[in-house]
């Protein structure tokens, strides 16, 4: 390892903010040092070291440099520059090009991004676009365990994918907590337009989250079973563990999606029930008012032969009759829960 380290250039001069990290590692997993983009081909010309490069929204010129240094395929470089790709894994000669979607909470809202990964026998390049946390923590964690990092770029790929998938768990918890709050709002008994809007927005974000996590399972399945020249057998169990995490997240999103659909249906049903209750009460009061209206209209026709009109108690009798009929109707409608 000492001979290899002594043969490396001694100083990094690259200060480009798009270049998050560019590090050379020995075959036994020890960090050698930071290097520049132009030094990559020199490092790969040596028999043992491998390189880990991290980029954040690089320019076209930066990607062209990487293409020259690593010999990357032009179609993969074009995809990495344009972003907005579907999640996928593609083989270009003796390298893999992987696209996965990422997510994180930004200013209270869930934002989605992409990570593109170039994987070769002696290099790994990660390219972040949009909402995505830095993989510096992944790199530090791997460097603290040189025995595992000695497994090479495929282990670094595991670290990156595990970090991406695990970052979905807090989002799933946020979805679950918000869904519980909305369920309480749904059963409050009062219609709120804001509740429907929140349910719809949550449903839309959940669908996007499902579209982000579902393809990762297929990518991990391929990494577990294929590409023997690039994926070490010792690393495959780790990818299987990440695949299990992704499956758990996918199941959780499926369950919450069904619960959201049910919540929207229940909310609309409760709104319908509330409207029916209002209609029933209006109908009850209308029936209650119909009795005095009928009696008043009866005596408003001015018939001449109505003997009770000539009696001194006629006026009081009609008032009593009207009150009696209304009282009976009130208790009948009250018992029927129409009032």
Image (tube, rainbow, N blue to C red):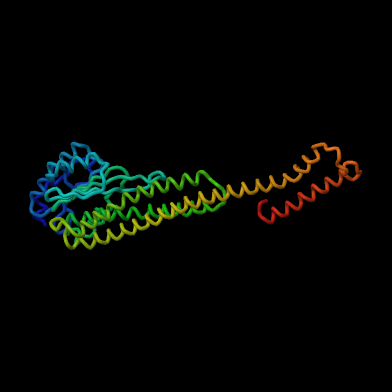
Does residue 231 appear in this view?
yes
Measured as percent of width and height from the top left, residue 169 is found at 36, 55
Residue, x 21% and y 59% (percent of image)? 224
Task: Count the marks.
Answer: 0
Choose top left, top right, bottom left or bottom right for residue 241. bottom left
Residue, x 34% and y 59% (percent of image)? 248
Does residue 123 appear in this view?
no
In the displayed structure image, the side of residue 2 where residue 189 appears, left or right: right
Residue, x 31% and y 46% (percent of image)? 132
Measured as percent of width and height from the top left, residue 118 is found at 18, 48
Where is 272 relative to 303, above or below? Answer: below
In the displayed structure image, the side of residue 185 where residue 201 appears, left or right: left
Q: Quadrant of the N terminus?
A: bottom left
Measured as percent of width and height from the top left, residue 231 is found at 17, 57
Residue, x 67% and y 55% (percent of image)? 336
Where is 115 relative to 249, above or below? Answer: above
């Amino acid at each position: 390892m000492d001979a290899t380290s002594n043969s490396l250039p001694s100083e990094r001069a690259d200060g480009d903010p798009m270049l998050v990290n560019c590090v050379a590692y020995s075959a036994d997993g020890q960090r050698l040092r930071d290097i520049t983009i132009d030094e990559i081909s020199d490092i790969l010309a040596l028999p043992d070291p491998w390189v880990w490069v991290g980029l954040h929204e690089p320019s076209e010129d930066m990607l062209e440099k990487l293409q020259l240094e690593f010999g990357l395929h032009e179609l993969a470089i074009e995809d990495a520059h344009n972003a907005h790709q579907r999640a996928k894994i593609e083989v270009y000669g003796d390298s893999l090009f992987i696209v996965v979607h990422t997510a994180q909470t930004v200013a209270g809202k869930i934002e989605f991004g992409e990570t593109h990964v170039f994987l070769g026998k002696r290099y790994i390049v990660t390219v972040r676009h949009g909402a995505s946390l830095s993989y510096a923590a992944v790199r530090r964690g791997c460097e603290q365990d040189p025995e595992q990092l000695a497994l090479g770029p495929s282990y670094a790929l595991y670290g990156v994918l595990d970090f991406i998938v695990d970052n979905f768990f807090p989002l799933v918890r946020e979805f679950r907590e918000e869904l519980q709050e909305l369920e309480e709002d749904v059963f409050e008994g009062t219609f709120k337009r804001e509740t429907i809007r929140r349910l719809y927005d949550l449903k839309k974000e959940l669908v996007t989250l499902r579209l982000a996590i579902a393809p990762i399972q297929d990518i991990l399945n391929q990494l577990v079973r294929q590409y023997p020249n690039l994926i070490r057998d010792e690393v495959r169990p780790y990818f299987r563990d990440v695949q299990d995490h992704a499956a758990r997240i996918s199941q959780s999103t499926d369950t919450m999606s069904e619960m959201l659909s049910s919540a929207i249906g229940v909310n609309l049903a409760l709104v319908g029930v509330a409207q029916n209750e209002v209609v029933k009460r209006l109908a009850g009061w209308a029936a209650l008012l119909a009795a005095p209206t009928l009696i008043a209209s009866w005596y408003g026709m001015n018939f001449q032969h109505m003997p009770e009109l000539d009696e001194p108690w006629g006026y009081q009798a009609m008032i009593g009759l009207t009150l009696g009929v209304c009282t009976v109707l009130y208790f009948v409608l009250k018992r029927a829960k129409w009032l």
